[in-house]
Amino acid sequence: MTSTSVLDLTGVSRTVNGKIIVSDIDLSLKPGETLGLIGPNGSGKSTLLNMIAGLVRPSRGEINICGHSMAHMRRRKIARHIAFVAQQADTGERITVRDAVELGRTPWLSALRPWGPEDDEAVAQALGVVGMQTMVCRDWSSLSGGERQRVQIARALAQATPILLLDEPTNHLDIHHQIAILDLVERLPATIVIALHDMHHALRCDRILAMKNGRCIALGPPLEVLTPEIIGEIFAVEAMRIPDPAGGRPLFSFRSLT
């Protein structure tokens, strides 16, 4: 573990009913780094994120946050370091956009530290970052999928943590909203771990962790990990990487092997 890292995983594994879900993940992230998780459904991405978030315990291995062992941290302290945006957020409660974002301040509140001006400011800033400041009175139930994702990211921003986890935040969104969410995430001043399905989206990350059957297949810069060979091994497809005629990030073409 280096002194400059904010998140360190050493031999992290998770076994459920004798089945290995995640196996021996070693990882160290620096402040401001964005790590993309890729892999097929069932590869262990969501379980890994849930362990990093402190929602489930590793069966083996250790997670350190800013130099502190997660195993010895209370839930409130973990929530002051890590915010988690799940794949789909829903609620049966009748709440407004502002209510949803205010939930992000919960880890910082107590009987001795009630809601104050700094919490109002954190919520206002978070809403402004995601462009939802004019919709604070809207009911959650009236929001589109893209709007809900933006609100959930605002809630995570209001939580004011150095680490942000996102589990497939572009899932079920149209192309316009996918790009808008990824542009937003790219501007955030946090260390980010984001699970993605789209290879083109993964190219935006600083590093990629490719997973299959709970194991790390490759870890490194996007162009070193997202090769036809590694993509083919993980997803069982024939992949081609094509230069972008406009000079941007490369493009991918896929063909089934069956």
Image (spheres, grey):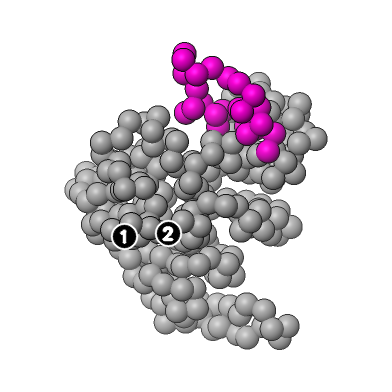
Q: Earlier in the sequence, mark 1 or mark 2?
A: 1
Q: Residue at 54% x, 39% y: name it.
A: 160
Q: Is residue 245 left or right of residue 5?
A: right
In which image quadrant can residue 28 be found? bottom left
Label 2, secondary structure: give it: loop
Q: Is residue 11 left or right of residue 128?
A: left
In which image quadrant can residue 100 be found? top right
Label 1, secondary structure: give it: loop
Residue placed furthest toward the front: 3
- In the image, residue 105 above or below residue 21: above
Task: Give the percent coordinates (x, y) of residue 80.
Answer: 45, 36
Q: Which residues are magenta?
A: 99-125
Residue 19 in sight in this render: no
Quarter of the figure that contains the N terminus: bottom left
Indicate the amino acid at tag 1.
Thr
- The numbered mark at residue 30 is 2
Indicate the amino acid at tag 2.
Lys
| Label 2 crowd (10 A; few <14 / some 14-19 / many >=20) | some
Q: Is disc 1 in contact with disc 2, using a CB cutoff of under 8 Å?
A: yes
Q: Residue at 73% x, 83% y: name it.
A: 246
Q: Is residue 57 left or right of residue 157?
A: left
Report if residue 103 lies within the magenta region.
yes
Task: Give the percent coordinates (x, y) of residue 211.
Answer: 37, 64
Residue linked to disc 1: 2
Report if residue 21 lies within the magenta region.
no
